Amino acid sequence: MQSQTESDLASPAVLSGWITRKDLAQALRVTVDTLGRWEARRVGPPCVRAGRMVLYRRRAVQDWLAAQEMPRAKAAGGRT
């Protein structure tokens, strides 16, 4: 039986629930710099840093997007 090496721990399976800043920027159609500004202002999705790499948990991004939803406007003159 083999023991896990450092390279095994860094395999893609370990990062399966995470997305890079570059990939998230492309998905949201914003720049990497915009995501950096959002992080600094604490207005964007939560992220973690692993060395120079910035990662976003996919579920946290989905939760953040859901929290950005605007309530529907009531129809003019309509009943509630």
Image (cartoon, rainbow, N blue to C red):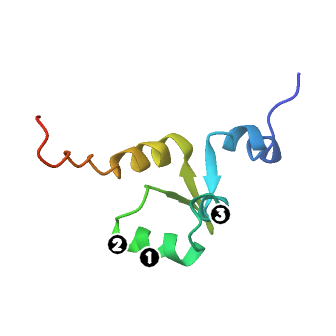
Q: Nearer the viewer, mark 2 or mark 3?
A: 3
* Residue 66 showing in the rendered view: yes
* Residue 51 showing in the rendered view: no
Q: Which residue is mark 2?
A: 41
Name the residue at 68% across, 44% down: 15
Q: Which residue is mark 1?
A: 37
- Check disc 3: other Cα within 10 Å, few if <14, some if 14-19, many if 20+: few
Q: Amino acid under label 3? A: Gln
Q: Amino acid under label 1? A: Arg
User: Closer to the camera, 70 or 74?
Assistant: 74
Proximity of marks 2 and 1: CB atoms separated by less than 8 Å: yes
Name the residue at 11% across, 35% down: 79
Locate residue 26: give its quadrant.
bottom right
What is the spatial separation of the Cα atoms under label 3 and label 1, in whole angstroms? Answer: 16 Å
Q: x, y percentage for residue 5?
A: 81, 41
> Mark 1 falls on what kind of element?
helix
Q: x, y percentage for residue 55?
A: 58, 56
User: Closer to the camera, 35 or 3?
Assistant: 35
Q: Which residue is mark 3?
A: 26
Residue 33 versus residue 68 in the image, above or below: below
